[in-house]
Amino acid sequence: DQQVKQNSPSLSVQEGRISILNCDYTNSMFDYFLWYKKYPAEGPTFLISISSIKDKNEDGRFTVFLNKSAKHLSLHIVPSQPGDSAVYFCAAPGEETSGSRLTFGEGTQLTVNP
Amino acid sequence: GAVVSQHPSWVICKSGTSVKIECRSLDFQATTMFWYRQFPKQSLMLMATSNEGSKATYEQGVEKDKFLINHASLTLSTLTVTSAHPEDSSFYICSARVPTGLNNEQFFGPGTRLTVL
């Protein structure tokens, strides 16, 4: 059962435009979400997170939106830069209060064209 | 942010040999570390949760006798792939949970590319 889903395996945008990466989840108990960015042959790096008490969290060019009723979150990158080209994973911690593992989506390959 | 290292970054071995991968938290102590594997163009698949001082917790379908995990100290966890076969070739990534960090935030190592001939 894939509790975190990223239905778009790839996304291509032009430099300077907005990139919107989507993520859906099925477990209503998830109350915290994280986005990770991953370059080939490297480990993921933390990008931004959001708690379920918020519907928006912004950090520079990155903004994450959470729609709890739709069980949907999205990551907006604006303006997009070629260096943003990477695979983006959304993730949610399990229900344990400590040592909780992360459930990852399948990832979306973002390509930003110069 | 917190730094997690992995060694080696890549390894090529013959079928039937065992390979040990180290995961270290460099500037913090991690009671919990996680081991993932990633096949090309696929998501990160959690293999096991490594707990310092106790046995690892393996995910369903992961053979504990094949993927031996030892969390010997608060800064080191090792994954040993025993009797490796070509189908074990993959990108193995560890992560460590920062005890005082954001809720369940994990920092990842750079990964180890294993190729079994």
Image: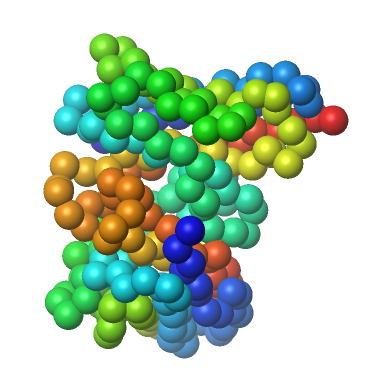
Q: Identify the residue at horizontal 61%, vertical 29% (top origin).
A: A61
Say if residue A9 shows up in the picture: no
The correct choice, above or below, for A67 with respect to B39 in the image is above
Q: How many marks?
A: 0
Locate residue B57, reporting x and y percent: 19, 65
Q: How is the image coloured?
A: rainbow
Residue appearing at x 27%, y 85% in the figure: B72
Which of the 4 image quarters holds residue A104? top left
Q: Nearer the viewer, residue A60 or A99?
A: A60
On-image quarter of the N terminus of chain A: top left
The residue closer to the viewer here, A17 or A71, is A17
Name the residue at 64% across, 33% down: A110
Residue at the limit of the structure toward the right, as seen here: A114
Measured from the top left, where is residue A64 in percent x and y? 46, 26
Does A87 sit left or right of A73 as displayed?
A: right
- Residue A21 location, x and y as percent? 54, 25
- Residue B9 seen anywhere in this rendered image of the structure: yes
In the image, residue A71 sits, relative to residue A39, either above or below, namely above
User: Where, by quadrant of the figure, is residue B51 drawn?
Assistant: bottom left
Question: Is residue B4 placed above or below A99 in the rendered structure?
Answer: below
User: Please, is residue A56 above or below residue A5 in the view?
Assistant: above
- Coordinates of residue B90 in the picture (x, y in percent): 52, 63
Q: Nearer the viewer, residue B20 or A21?
A: A21
Q: Residue at x 33, y 60 (%)?
A: B98
Residue A76 lies in quadrant: top right
Q: Quadrant of the C terminus of chain A?
A: top right
Tell which residue pokes out farthest to the top in this image: A69
